Image (spheres, rainbow, N blue to C red):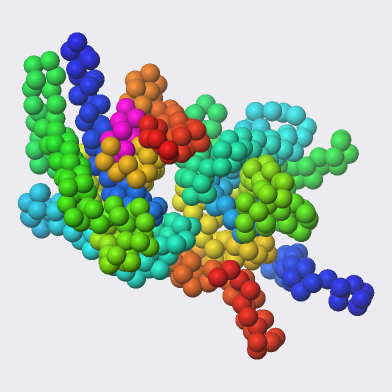
Amino acid sequence: MQNVLTKISGEAKFELLIFLALASIPLVFSGYILFILPQYMLFGLLAVSLSILWGLTGIISFGQAGFFAIGAYAIGIVVKSTFLMNSAILGILLGIIVSAVIAGVVGYFLFSAKVKATYFVLATLALSIIIEQLAKSQKEITGGWNGLFVDRISISFGNLLEYSLFNDIPMYYFTLLLTIIAYALIKFLTTSNFGKILRGIRENEDRILALGYNTSIYKTLIFCVSGALAGFAGSIYGTHAGFVDPSLARVLFSTEVIVWVAIGGRNSIIGSFLGGILVASLANYLNSITPEYWQLIIGIVFIAVVILFKGGLAGGLEEIYHRLKSKNYVSARNP
Amino acid sequence: MELAASVLLDTTLITLTLALAAFGLAIIYGLIGVINMGHGAMLTLGAYFTWAGLQLEIPFVLSVILSGFIVGFIGLLFEHWIIKRFYNSPYETLLLTWAFFLVTTELIKIVFGSDFRTVVNPYPGSIDLGFYKIPTYRTLICVFTAFVILSTGFVFFRTSTGIKIRAMIQNREMASLLGLNISLTYKIIFGFGCFMAGLAGGLVAPMLSVSPYMGDMYLVRSFFVVIVGGIGQILSGTIIGSFVIGGLETIVALFSDQVIAQVAVFFFAIVILRIRPQGIFSEK
């Protein structure tokens, strides 16, 4: 055991610690926190979906909320309109697939023409607005402005066992389990060769192109994965919150995702995940004590982070850690 | 014939109003390459300052001009304290101007509240052409827009300041070696773009209801105006882009509803981004 623990890296230990802490929270606390924390974990996944674009590949998307909303609407519409046994699983799958397909089509369309990175930002902004407008206007399907109520789902395994997620504790562990699975898959992806190529694209796309990799395919694929992850988080969010409305797709929500990732640390998956959880809960807390000023405070923190810490809190902590370790440490971050 | 003439007039009105709203963005993006995501918030600020000016019983025209100057000054401060350090990193300027939007919108909500305000139309009534009536105020705005664009063109192509700016766009290092003060020129251009945004916000205020988010729709539309028209083609590009975006939206809205029209325009703009990133009519 000792041997295994020393073998895994500091970051992996930290990740393990975070998920153990999340798993033990229901043993200690009860009440509101058990209701709200799963939502924040899903926001954490949404933040991860941006960080694999922004931190890993160097592409910014202003449309992550759009995919999140697609996921949430997918489960809402499927659960409402079908009476199949596993409509919940169907809804989640549909949310993932629709998001991934839209991301794939838009991504390939733009990346294959070598559209500039800043133009891609504008295109995703437009995509998010299109999704929001469609959600508002297609009243028969989406409920329009009024939104859609979604029941808490139950997961059934054949006819034998039905696991209802109506209560908070089952929902908590269900969400945590899915979050860990999704997180582990993303982690695997980023440490694989695929992840290395994406990092190469971030640093010098022409060089990776010259090495014979079709970079537009890689960028399209990571955008697909990112869309799928955001859609997945959104679909679980839909059943957890019990309510879906067009404001989920609004640009301001996409912006919040950018703020979480910027504050958490765009280059660190765990940093972004924690950024999602912590900044969203901080926002909730500030909203309860100063409803007028909280968005202002978050906006100012955002400016400060962009100007002062390019790597966000994760990058800042890493630097302090290295400085303490060796006094001669030269910053390895991008100049 | 009369139908055609009225459609033509309508399209002209829409094109020039949109061009007015997009002009500040086109200047900043086209000349110094900064994507000003705060443009929408600057329009909104201009509208609120104009509203506040009217509350203080300052005449409308003076209120609009004052709003332009105040927003221009705020833009200058923002440039001086923050943006000027990030001219070489497009992502950072994009995020920082977006943060400017967030903070400004919140400040507007705190100072003015979130409820809708109205700016009374200072020139109600319409000009009767016999077959068609054009609203007086919108006509005045269009004349003003045409004037602004033409006079910017004059400064750009017929004065020594214009020559310096064009030299700077062509080769920044060389222009700087020849004694052109680059950072001051950038500052002036950024400030002028913000001034135009504030002015435009004040001018469109009587046509819309003033709310903290009124600039948002204009922000995205203005981007597409600039992209469809071609970046750097500040004068003709802004007009062509506004014509395509505004005209398309009007035509699609004739056959379906407003929402579908907007979706169609955005979709169209994404397609343009891909197939003609240099602008719809401009040469490479």
Rendered-image quadrant of the C terminus of chain A: bottom right
Q: Is residue B101 left or right of residue A32?
A: left
Q: Is residue A160 left or right of residue B13?
A: right
- Residue B229 in the image: above or below residue A122: above
Q: Is residue A264 magenta?
A: no
Residue nearer the viewer, A258 or A209: A209
Give the magenta-colored segment's residue range: B237-247
Q: Is residue A16 left or right of residue B55?
A: right
Position of A17 relative to A41 (above/below): below
- Residue at horizontal 50%, vertical 33%? B275
Give the x, y percent position of residue A191: 76, 59
Quarter of the image for residue B63 reads bottom left
Query: Where on the picture, by quarter, is residue A296?
Result: bottom left
Horizontally, residue B214 falls left or right of residue A288, namely: left
The foreground one among B40 and B238 is B238
Which residue shows up at 21% across the image and 31% down it?
Answer: B13
Q: Quadrant of residue B177?
A: bottom left
| Residue situated in front as seen by the camera: A166 or B82 | B82
Note whether residue B227 is visible: yes
Q: Position of residue A193 (x, y in %)?
A: 78, 54
Task: Give the residue displayed 73% in from the left and 35% down from the top.
Answer: A90
Q: Main secondary structure of the magenta part?
A: helix
Seen as rendered, the residue at the extreme top is B1
Q: Position of residue B141 (x, y in %)?
A: 16, 38
